[in-house]
Amino acid sequence: MHFETIIWIAPVFFQNLADKPSLLRTISEQKILTNASYVLQCVVQSGSQPIFFEWFKDNQSLTSAVYKIESHRILSILTLENLQTNSSGLYKCQARNVFGSDFIETNLIVQGLFISAFLFFNDSLEPSLSGFHPRITQREGSNFILTCSVIDGQEPFNFVWTKNGHRLAKDNQSRVVIDSKPNYSLLTLLKLISSDSGNYSCSVSNRFGIDSQWSVLQVKGLMICLYH
């Protein structure tokens, strides 16, 4: 007789060393005003190193000689500054290794300013953040990266990250890394464990106001089926 046993374990003990890249899904469309900045992130959830990144706009390759592109082992960031209407387009990030590739796409729509009696200066605005995915599921042992990107408002900005309403800071084991730039902040959780599950929120403020976004992270163990 054959029967199936299902066991939940952490993938740190059973890793497939021949994986193609798997990228964190992002929002498919983003609207933004002219003259603003926007940060696109490409995050590897799993995959064998080395992994190489390439960015495209409307199927045309983008180079670091013209665009601000920063790439690391599991992360690539494309920063777009002083956006104009001709910056609109379909932006694509492709990650590849010897086993295959994966890609994500975001349709960026840059809109002109609507001038009214109530709006005299574009730079005198409260901050506005790019939207987060409401729910994200990742495996134990993987790395989690969340970008809090300001798409409108006047600098300087102050970023605050929280988990379940409690402020986050870099921990003693350095599993939590917060890297804030003038117009975006990166939250990185290294080697996820089940207790990392929770509601993660980023708040940004300036002298005109505040905005926030949140995402619920669910960390799952690796399920292995054993047959006898």
Image: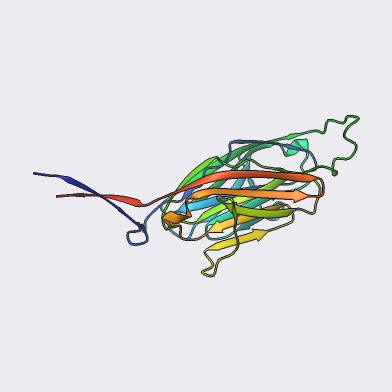
Nearer the observer, 175 or 40: 175
Nearer the observer, 177 or 86: 177
Where is residue 28? Give x, y as percent.
58, 36
| Residue that sits furthest to the left in the current view | 1
Is residue 54 visible in the rendered structure shown here?
no
Residue at 53% x, 60% y: name it: 73
Color encoding of the figure: rainbow
Where is residue 87? Give x, y as percent.
73, 39
Please state, as top left, top right, bottom left or bottom right, where the N terminus lies in the image.
top left
Left-right relation of 199 to 77: left
Left-right relation of 111 to 18: right
Is residue 81 visible in the rendered structure shown here?
yes
Nearer the observer, 73 or 188: 188
Where is residue 107? Give x, y as percent.
63, 36
Q: Number of labelled discs?
A: 0
Residue at 58% x, 39% y: name it: 27
Please, is residue 163 above or below residue 211 in the view?
Answer: below
Left-right relation of 82 to 191: right
Task: Classify residue 85 by image quadrant.
Answer: top right
| Residue that sits furthest to the front in the current view | 165
Where is residue 102? Give x, y as percent.
48, 46
Task: Classify residue 117 by image quadrant.
Answer: top right
| Residue that sits furthest to the bottom in the current view | 172
Please, is residue 152 above or below residue 186 in the view?
Answer: above
